[in-house]
Amino acid sequence: MEDVEYGPNESIDGKQNNQNGQKIIKSDTQVAGVDFDLISKDLKTARIISPAYASSKSELLAILLYTYQIFQFSYQKREDIAKQLEEISIQEMTHLEWLGQMLIRLGVAPIYTHYPPIPANFFTTRFVPYNSNQIMMIKIDLQGEKQAIADYKKIISQLDNELVKKVIQEIVKQEENHVVILTKILEELQDRPR
């Protein structure tokens, strides 16, 4: 990916500061160098990437898991961690958007199943690993992010479609950053006096 220069109100994490200094999500959610409208019907590619969309190990699951954990950490008076998980969750929503946009262009209705558009194996919230222990929640997150990276790398190895591959490679980079963030959170929680 190309080096990017950031403006005076923009930080390297993709956020911008408004005039009050508050962080706002960058509105550009496209992948640099990828015009999604150039992706055309390709059912083989759709089948390769679809489990990352809405299966038991998917972006949809990650969004729901992080949302549940945001509630838990907020209730437990750890707004600092809840905010970091919210930022990760928003990035996972972008990944879901990218996958959905690619699936529909690849010729598949992006319904929430393991292999859309097959109306079977629908996503269910029973996949969400509910837990309220702070350390366990972050350990679950780290395991999920590491599994996602491995799964995405396997997907990349199967892809012939270079545009789709570029999007998946960007997702991997972002998931690797999530591992860094979550590792720091876990270290802080484990070092905290009980």
Image (cartoon, helix red, strand yellow):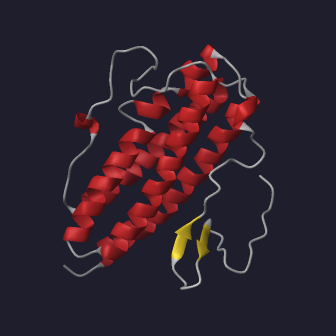
Name the residue: 40% across, 53% down: 142
- As drawn, which residue projects farthest toward the front? 19
- The answer to whether residue 118 is left or right of residue 20 is left
Instruction: Choose between 184 and 118: the one closer to the eye.
Output: 118
Look at the picture and state if 132 lies above or below 147.
below
Quadrant location of residue 59?
Answer: top left
Q: Determine the residue positioned at 48% across, 33% down.
A: 52
| 73 over 132 or under it: above or below | below
Q: Position of residue 98 (x, y in %)?
A: 58, 40
Q: In this picture, is 160 found above or below 140?
A: above
Q: How many marks?
A: 0
User: Which residue in the rendered view is the most extreme toward the bottom?
Assistant: 20
Q: Quadrant of the C terminus?
A: bottom left
To which quarter of the image does residue 135 belong? bottom left
Q: Is residue 44 left or right of residue 96?
A: right
At horizontal 65% and vertical 47% (from top left) the residue drawn is 170
Looking at the picture, how far across and down is residue 121, in whole percent?
Answer: 33, 19
Q: Is residue 44 left or right of residue 136?
A: right
Residue at image coords 33%, 47%: 64
Q: What is the x, y in percent for residue 181?
A: 48, 65
Residue 9 appears at what percent x and percent y? 67, 79
